[in-house]
Image: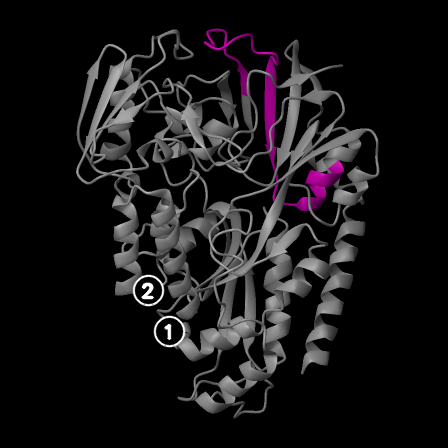
């Protein structure tokens, strides 16, 4: 059995290598753009397999893009060491003893891009908009009141909120000017406080163009114009950079990264991220059987996937939270680690058998097992791990049918539960603490928990975490929650990416950070 799995992986390795070679066949011309000048303005062109569905920051996870594109900022900011500091607010924010009343002082010199002053009342109105017109705010905290007095903002919460500054660093809480007409914010973008202003956003191509904010509050903006070009075709992304269509590219594929490492015309910024590539398993269907989920997990040779297929650009997954943070990767126990012989035994003992002789098993009730595995190609590892899982599971008679869509469609499917298996890259540490992302994807009632997973013990632990202030206690409780997910065979944790930004030597000030949503700022520049 192990030999057959290794052979299947070898085939996939060949396919991955071929993809890398084929990416050179003229794909870059499809980008239809060029670095240089546009409308008389020096223009930086950035390619990415990620893009917004809308520029309204309160819709789904689209707030990431106004931050990435330099349009918006938040009260607080996540640093590379997972600490939190003030951004639009001064450092020195404080709370009462039980963490239900938090006081922030908004920096006095900040203006929106339209010239309107940012004071506490404007921040209050922006935060109220999240809760009145968005849907995810209550997963972070529930405000009882917000009071503004000049530059001072006081937020009173329903429950203790010991990490409210972390939560306010999430792009969902991007500060925007709500005093203007925002009826066309989805396409025109918000009025924010960042170094750039949205010039245009094409909802069909997902191309976004930003220009220098002449009213920027924090120094001179060094770049006049940036184009963000979207394609989920990894060959277009890589070849566009080689051909000069792009000045920089976010998250170059593991099949192409060595091309740029060996070329002195390029420089690369890399960092471990807070991301985990997860295979969600929908328990509302066949995967409601824990034995089947355990067998699937025990067929995943993640070490081999990462070493051979992903070319050591990813760390093998084990726990929900990335190995780059101190949340139990080295200490928690995986009861369903790679064990193909035991996976076969589990299926045999449970009555999964190939009764019709087609090479694939049926359920004990005689229902064909054909698991639809949904994924998107905007992140290069997804197709590889999905096809590797398909190949491995085929060797024990479990049929998997890959089903590829664009990123936004997959996010919509995740929310609706329209899948058996679904691959998604989640930044669990997106605000330097995993609480909210865990709630969103795994706690009962979470916006994106459509798997049917509902553990009273797990939910209780997450409730405790919510009100716990001591960092060590929070970490211990989080590890306990992670162990429950492992014991319940809740999901496949395939790998953790090493993120990269590859750019021409003439580009400076593009950021690659664990937060993954600070791409450009006032110091981003083109030096040619």
For image coordinates 47% across by 91% down, the residue present is 349
- The C terminus - image quarter: top right
Q: Is residue 69 left or right of residue 146?
A: right
For image coordinates 58% across by 77% down, the residue present is 339
Q: Name the residue under label 1.
A: 288
Q: Mark 2 points at which residue?
A: 452
Gap in angstroms between the C-alphas marked 1 and 2: 8 Å
Q: Does the magenta stretch include residue 15?
A: no
When asked about the image quadrant of residue 187, the answer is top left
Q: Is residue 474 left or right of residue 394?
A: left
- Image marks 1 and 2: residues in contact by CB distance under 8 Å: yes
Mark 1 or mark 2: whose residue is earlier in sequence? 1
Vertical placement of 513 versus 175: above or below?
below
User: Residue 364 placed where, x, y %?
Assistant: 42, 89
Compare residues 5 and 435 and report the one nearer the observer: 435
Picture mark count? 2
Q: Is residue 246 left or right of residue 356?
A: right
For image coordinates 48% across by 79% down, the residue present is 369
User: Residue 421 placed where, x, y %?
Assistant: 48, 64
Vertical placement of 455 versus 111: above or below?
below
> Mark 2: which secondary structure?
loop
When asked about the image quadrant of residue 249, the answer is top right
Q: Does the magenta stretch include residue 233?
A: yes
Say whether residue 448 is visible.
Answer: no
Write the start and end of the magenta stretch as one range.
210-239
């Amino acid at each position: 059995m192990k030999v057959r799995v290794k052979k299947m992986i070898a085939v996939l390795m060949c396919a991955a290598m071929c993809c890398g070679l084929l990416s050179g066949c003229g794909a870059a011309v499809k980008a239809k753009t060029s670095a240089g000048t546009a409308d008389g303005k020096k223009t930086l062109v950035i390619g990415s397999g990620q893009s917004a569905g809308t520029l309204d920051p309160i819709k789904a996870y689209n707030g990431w893009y106004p931050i990435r594109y330099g349009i918006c900022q938040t009260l607080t900011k996540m640093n590379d060491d997972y600490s939190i500091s003030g951004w639009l607010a001064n450092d020195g924010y404080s709370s009462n003893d039980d963490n239900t009343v938090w006081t922030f002082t908004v920096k006095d010199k900040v203006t929106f891009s339209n010239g309107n002053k940012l004071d506490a009342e404007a921040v209050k109105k922006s935060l109220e908009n999240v809760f009145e017109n968005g849907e995810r705010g209550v997963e972070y905290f529930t405000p009882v009141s917000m009071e503004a007095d000049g530059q001072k903002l006081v937020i009173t919460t329903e429950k203790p909120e010991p990490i409210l500054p972390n939560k306010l660093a999430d792009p969902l809480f991007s500060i925007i000017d709500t005093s203007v007409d925002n009826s066309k914010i989805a396409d025109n973008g918000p009025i924010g406080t960042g170094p750039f202003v949205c010039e245009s956003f094409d909802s069909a191509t997902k191309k976004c163009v930003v220009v220098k904010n002449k009213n920027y509050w924090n120094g001179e903006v060094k770049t006049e114009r940036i184009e963000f070009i979207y394609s989920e075709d990894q060959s277009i992304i890589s070849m566009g950079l080689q051909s000069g269509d792009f000045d920089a590219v976010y998250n170059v594929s593991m099949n192409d990264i060595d091309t740029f490492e060996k070329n002195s015309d390029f420089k690369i910024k890399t960092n471990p991220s807070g991301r985990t590539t997860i295979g969600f398993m929908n328990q509302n269907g066949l995967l409601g059987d824990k034995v089947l989920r355990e067998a699937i997990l025990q067929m995943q040779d993640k070490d081999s996937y990462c070493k051979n297929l992903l070319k050591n650009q990813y760390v093998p997954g084990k726990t929900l939270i990335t190995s780059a943070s101190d949340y139990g990767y080295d200490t928690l126990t995986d009861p369903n680690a790679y064990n193909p012989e035991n996976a076969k035994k589990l299926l045999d003992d449970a009555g999964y058998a190939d009764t019709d002789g087609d090479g694939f098993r049926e359920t004990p009730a005689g229902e064909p097992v054909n698991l639809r595995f949904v994924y998107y190609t905007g992140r290069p590892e997804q197709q590889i791990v999905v096809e590797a899982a398909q190949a491995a599971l085929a060797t024990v008679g479990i049929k998997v049918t890959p089903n590829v869509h664009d990123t936004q469609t997959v996010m919509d499917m995740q929310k609706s539960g329209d899948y058996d298996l679904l691959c998604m890259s989640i930044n669990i540490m997106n605000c330097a603490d995993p609480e909210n992302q865990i709630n969103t994807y795994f706690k009962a009632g979470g916006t994106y928990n459509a798997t049917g997973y509902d553990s009273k013990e797990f939910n209780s632990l997450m409730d405790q975490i919510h009100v716990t202030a001591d960092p060590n206690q929070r970490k211990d409780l989080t590890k306990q929650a992670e162990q429950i997910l492992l014991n319940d065979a809740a999901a496949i944790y395939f790998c953790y990416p090493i993120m990269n930004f590859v750019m021409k030597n003439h580009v400076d000030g593009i950021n690659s950070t664990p937060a993954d949503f600070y791409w450009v700022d006032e110091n981003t520049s083109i030096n040619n």
